[in-house]
Amino acid sequence: MAENEIEYRQSEIVRVTLIGTVINAFLIVLKFAAGVFADSAAMVADGVHSLSDFLTDFVVIVMLKISSKPSDKDHAFGHGKYETLATTIIGLLLILVGGGILWSGSTKIYYYFFYGEELLSPGWFAFVAAIVSILMKEGIYQYTIRKSKNLNSEALVANAWHHRSDALSSIGTAIGIGAACLLGSQWAILDPLAAIIVSFFIFKVAIQLIRSSVSQLLESSLPIEVEKEIEEIVNSYPGVTEMHNLRTRQVGVNYAITMHVRMDGNISLYESHERVDQIEKALKERFGHQTIISIHVEPWK
């Protein structure tokens, strides 16, 4: 990407994240108010989840600021992996959120069955707050995931799924609160049961995010279809006899590509250099101008 494209990408990611921050701030106030005034412990727990979303937004913004810095003496390949690190942090936060919801739901059921602890029947204000949360969080999820694809941002993908995990937890809360309001306090157990089910959905998303980001941090190769495309581009140039020792990885949003290319040993050094420049230009046009490319030329007779 050109410098102006990088600045645009950064400003767009920050803008999308800040929109989510404003929504999260509103929902934190709404959920805690509903939890207190409508006697809903589930809604208070849901408010804690929204608070974790609020903190996640700041993680994305801080890591993005760092990842957009240019290369320096200590980071020759740039700071792109800070964005990948942000994805890992968000995944870990999701596991903590899922664990908290699982623990809360499980302990309520345990004390209900073994100690006869009464589950409170919440008021309708809590149910309305849960519905508002579902609609707003699903809306910001759809918006964020769409922008993440346009901007090629893993951190935004992770943040989008954090929004959806909040929507899912609100669904569980709404089911439990709605059932308790309609059917009476004897059905209030549906609240913690739904919360437990939702926690496993959150665990699934968290594991997927962590697996993807850790794969990049450990410098796994690019997908096989990308490597095949690289090979096709290189071999399409006249004078290239063979390409081998292809090594690829991802540095943040950018690709890093190294390879050995065999060319006619009788051509001049100047001519082989010109051909390598053409190959690099073609690869950068396809995969972005910030693509890191290293080509070692070997003579072939």
Image (cartoon, rainbow, N blue to C red):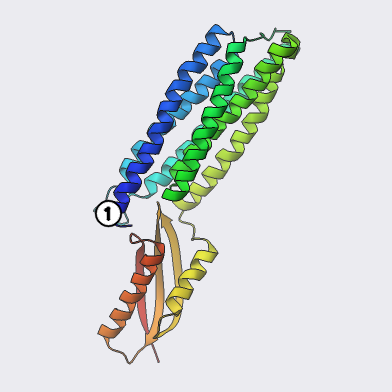
- Does the rendering let one see residue 152? no
Q: Residue at x 33, y 57 (%)?
A: 1
Q: Residue at x 46, y 52 (%)?
A: 216
- Does the rendering let one see residue 112? yes
Q: Quadrant of residue 124?
A: top right
Using the image as rendered, state which of residue 223 and residue 37 is in the foreground. 37
* Residue 198 vertical position relative to residue 42 in the rendered view, above or below: below
* Residue 28 vertical position relative to residue 155 in the rendered view, above or below: above
* Residue 142 vertical position relative to residue 45 in the rendered view, above or below: below
Return the x and y of residue 57 as percentages of the image width and height: 41, 33
Residue type of the residue flagged with mark 1: Glu
Q: Secondary structure at mark 1?
A: helix
Return the x and y of residue 22 as percentages of the image width and height: 40, 27
Return the x and y of residue 100 as percentages of the image width and height: 57, 24
- Read off the residue under disc 1: 3
Label 1 packing within 10 angstroms: few (<14), some (14-19), many (20+): few
Q: Residue at x 67, y 9 (%)?
A: 121
Q: Quadrant of the C terminus?
A: bottom left
